């Protein structure tokens, strides 16, 4: 994992897609230690580290670890009190509005109780392929979006976009299997198209503004090319 930020209190790393933040809470769901960020961070820092927030296994991008239990407590409080600003990028099925808000309650994973959830987004670009991926439309349309979750519910971004009929590409749980397969087989873009691009907050000790951004990776370079208006859509298809 690439180290993005380090001081005496915490570090930020660039989490790869397909890695879990920590061991699964269900002991029957075993994950290789090589796929767990916590162990990589401990080896990197040569000390004990503490996870302070979560990213889904399929999500890449900015991930924080505290370097002490005291630091972990303060950083966790930032997330609990919604004192952080999180910016994600995602690719979704269909053409979304230029910008919008999704304020739909979501069920808690533990109790199934409904709780408030708020996500806002703005559209960055669109692309259309002359291919009938599903049975409903003769072409396949996609949007590249910037997303800000104002609450931190389980799978919030993925569930909210599914609820407005614009599921994320590569989402095996809440997504569209036909379009996931099209991205994987014909565009050679695998996995969940969701990236924790930027994390901003006020440093709990110095009071300074901290802004940590994940760098480009090969997958998101491909996505950027996919939405390049200078390239004809047909040239982006690998095979049919």
Image: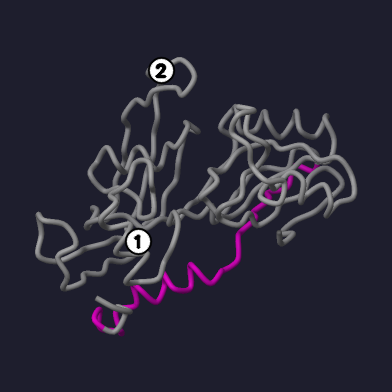
Q: What residue would you read off at disc 2?
A: 112
Residue at image coords 60%, 27%: 26
Q: Is the residue 87 above or below the residue 73 in the image?
A: below
In-front residue for pair 232/200: 232
Depth check, front residue: 77 or 28: 28
Does dot 1 land on a helix, a strand or a loop?
strand
Number of dots carrying numbers: 2
**Residue 208 lies within the magenta run:** yes
> Where is residue 9 shown, x and y percent of the image?
83, 42
- What x and y, as percent, mark residue 103? 32, 32
Q: Residue at x 64, y 28 (%)?
A: 27
Q: Which mark is residue 144?
A: 1
In the rendered image, residue 23 lying in the magenta stretch gets the answer: no
Q: CA distance from mark 1 to mark 2?
A: 31 Å
Q: Nearer the viewer, mark 1 or mark 2?
A: 2
**Quarter of the figure with the N terminus:** bottom right
Q: Is residue 205 left or right of residue 22?
A: right
Q: Is residue 211 left or right of residue 194?
A: right
Q: Compared to 53, does 133 lie above or below?
A: below
Instruction: Say how the picture is coloured.
Output: one colour
Residue depicted at 41% across the width and 67% down the height: 189
Q: Can you tell which quarter of the image residue 66 is in?
A: top right
Residue numbers of the magenta segment: 206-234
Q: Quarter of the image for the C terminus: give it.
A: bottom left
Residue lying at 56% horizontally and 32% vertically, measured from the top left:
82
**Left or right of 231 on screen, residue 132:** left
Name the spot of residue 37 as percent of width and height, x first. 70, 48
């Amino acid at each position: 994992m690439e180290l993005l930020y380090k001081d005496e209190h915490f570090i930020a790393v660039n989490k790869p897609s397909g890695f879990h933040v920590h061991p699964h809470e269900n002991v029957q769901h075993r994950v290789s230690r090589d796929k767990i960020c916590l162990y990589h961070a401990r080896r990197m820092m040569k000390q004990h580290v503490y996870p302070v927030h979560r990213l889904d296994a399929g999500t890449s991008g900015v991930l924080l670890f505290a370097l002490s239990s005291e630091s972990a407590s303060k950083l966790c409080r930032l997330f609990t009190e919604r004192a952080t600003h999180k910016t994600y990028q995602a690719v979704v099925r269909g053409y979304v509005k230029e910008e919008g808000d999704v304020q739909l309650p979501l069920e808690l994973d533990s109790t199934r109780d409904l709780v408030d959830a708020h996500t806002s987004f703005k559209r960055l670009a669109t692309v259309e392929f002359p291919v009938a991926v599903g049975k409903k439309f003769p072409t396949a349309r996609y949007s590249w979006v910037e997303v800000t979750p104002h609450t931190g519910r389980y799978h919030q971004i993925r569930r909210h976009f599914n609820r407005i009929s614009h599921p994320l590409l590569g989402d095996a749980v809440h997504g569209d299997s036909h379009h996931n397969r099209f991205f994987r087989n014909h565009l050679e873009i695998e996995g969940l198209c969701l990236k924790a691009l930027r994390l901003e907050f006020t440093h709990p000790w110095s009071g300074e503004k901290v802004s940590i951004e994940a760098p480009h990776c090969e997958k998101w370079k491909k996505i950027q090319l996919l939405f390049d208006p200078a390239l004809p859509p047909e040239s982006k298809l690998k095979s049919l």
